[in-house]
Amino acid sequence: MQKVSFLAFVLLLVIGTLSVVSADTNDSWEVKLYFTSLSSSSGNTSPPPAPATYERIFGINSTAIDGFDRDIDKPAPPEPQGDALDVYFPCEHEVVTRLATDIKSNDTDKWKLNIVMPSQSITHLRWDNTSLPADEDFIIIVDGSETDMQSKDMIELTSGANEITVHMGDIPTSTKPSDPPGGGSGGGGGGATGEEFENIASKHAQVSKVAAGENVRYEFSEDDIDLMTIQFTSLSNEGQTKTSVEVLKDTSALVDSSAPGKVYQNLNIWVGNVAFNEDDMEIPVVGFRVSKEWISDNDVESSSVVLCRYNDGEWTQLPTEVIDENENYFIYESETPGFSPFAISAIYEEEESSEDTISSSEEKYDDFVEEEEVVENDSNTPDSNATPGFSILLSMGVLLLMAMIFRKKG
């Protein structure tokens, strides 16, 4: 009997020990993400650059605190100079704003990374799915596209900038981001901004440092986008801020009507997020180009091209001017009060002239009616000078009558 009791005690002790180990394992874990950038250039003039690989770690620790934990988290290197791979967890800390290792408390279910990839490159993101807690669901979200991390171990990203979200546990029914920007550069994509998937020809994104009082400039050079630059003066310190552009096949799904005139290209442009918007910008200017061949084929003048913006249920033609030209394109700049759906459009001269003609005709008709009314009114008004002969005869009659009276008296 004593032996049975002793064995039972040992068995309970083992089970308890296993439970503690299991609980500790669930409370503290980490997963490594490997980002490898590869050149996608087809040129043969020089060898491609060596692959760049970054290791980034996310996880949970029961003793961790939100923000930067100097005992657990690891800062990321400074932003690289030039066209290079950059991956980090953004951190809200007065000094450390970039993390290479982001370990959070055990009530956390989401990690976010910012990535900027070199131009003409692809980036492979890999992870060891056996290192993930087996009893949890993990989804990695890139540009509105979700990947199950438990069943997959790699995704491919194109050049440009993007935000990556790792979500643990039950995934919300909608993973649409709270702020408009989305999207890596190049290729079609899903409608993370609300745009219809089948209407997106390509997506492009850039990240730039935003500081109060400084001029911020985003540049686009891909062949499938005619937007060239977005620039403004920042009124606040925001740090790394992304701008995203969707090149559309047709009118944006976010508007109720087509832009006026002959549309050259429809675009959705988003800059910043809910915390940083047009109220934090001064003199936003959009630079774009229009093909000379298109202008010739559509029989329009280069001066008729304007940038139209859709806002508050209507299209507005923005102040636009030609600032340069080359062999194939006219280069334009437009000032805009904010960012939303846009259209590069040519307003036909005949449309303007026909409006002027109608307006002129209406004015002439109004003048004609006024003249007719004046004539009719004049015809109904007695005119004392209408019969001048009658007055003369009357005067002569009076004089003769007076003469006859004087002669009789004489």
Image: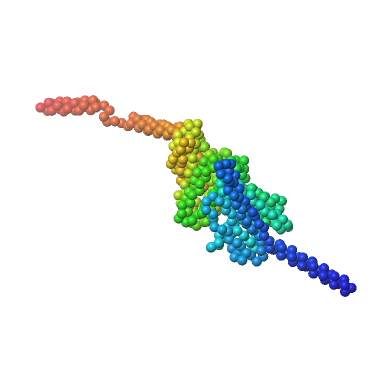
Looking at the image, which residue sits at the far bottom? 2
Q: Position of residue 160 (x, y in %)?
A: 57, 48
Q: Position of residue 410 (x, y in %)?
A: 10, 27
Q: Nearer the viewer, residue 223 or 406?
A: 223
Instruction: Give the quarter of the figure containing the N terminus.
Output: bottom right
Q: Position of residue 352 (x, y in %)?
A: 45, 34
Residue plotted at (57% across, 38% down): 250
Q: From what the image shows, is residue 381 above or below residue 96?
A: above
Residue plotted at (52% across, 53% down): 81
* Left or right side of 63 for 352: left
Q: Nearer the viewer, residue 227 or 10?
A: 10
Looking at the image, which residue sits at the far front? 46
Q: From what the image shows, is residue 358 above or below residue 104?
A: above
Q: From what the image shows, is residue 306 above or below residue 151?
A: above
Q: How many marks?
A: 0
* Left or right side of 5 for 66: left
Residue plotted at (77% across, 65% down): 18
